[in-house]
Amino acid sequence: MSDHDETGRRRPTLDRGDLPGAVVAVVLVNVVGALPAVLGGPNTAWFQSLAKPAIYPPPWVFGVVWPLLFTLMGVALYVVWRDARTTTRGVVALRLFVAQMAVNVAWTPTFFSAQDLTVALAVVAGLWLVLVPTLWTFWRIDRRAGGLLVPYFLWVSFAVLLNYRFVVLN
């Protein structure tokens, strides 16, 4: 990966002065992302009664994976906000990030509170569809920021399949 952007300018590096902003972004994304699960997650009799797909990971995995993904997303968000918030591409990237985050947050209440597996599948598929241009736009601004979203993209891809398997089995 080059230390220069697509225009040939030297890409800014993250340093200690960036730590407060990066921490704020990480905490913000983690709080927003975790709030729906805290308000109504998988600890319900309804969810426990569902047939679980063979690919369903042990429940503790979700408690490890999501905070890690939200942390990576927060750092990516900070990099884009810091480097491109005043550019057209940066504004588009930030709006896409907010849109995908809103769809992400909508999945948990749709699945667990509304108990609608089919609509939840539509929501997570919609998340995947919004995440693709988000990742691409972040990548075009800063490959590091785009790269930080790749694990999230892979997990959401898995989540689409997992939600589909829940629909099929239940």
Image (tube, helix red, strand yellow):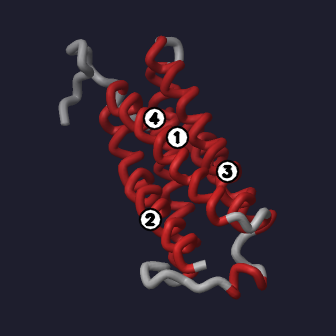
Measured in 3D between alpha carbons, the distance from the residue under mark 3 to the one under mark 2, in whole angstroms, is: 18 Å
> Element type at marker 2?
helix
- What residue does disc 4 label? 134
> Element type at marker 4?
helix
- What residue does disc 3 label? 105
Tell me whether the residue at label 1 lies in contact with that at label 3, contact meaning CB atoms closer than 8 angstroms: no
- What residue does disc 2 label? 161
Residue at 67% from the left image edge and 50% from the top image edge: 105
- What residue does disc 1 label? 19
Which comes sooner in the sequence, label 3 or label 4?
A: 3
Residue 61 in the image, given as x and y percentages of width and height: 51, 76
> Element type at marker 1?
helix
Q: Quadrant of residue 34?
A: bottom right
Measured in 3D between alpha carbons, the distance from the residue under mark 4 to the one under mark 1, in whole angstroms, is: 23 Å
Most foreground residue, 167 or 22: 167
Closer to the eye: label 4 or 1: 4
Tag 1: amino acid: Leu
Most foreground residue, 67 or 169: 169
Residue at 57% from the left image edge and 70% from the top image edge: 167
Closer to the eye: label 2 or 1: 2
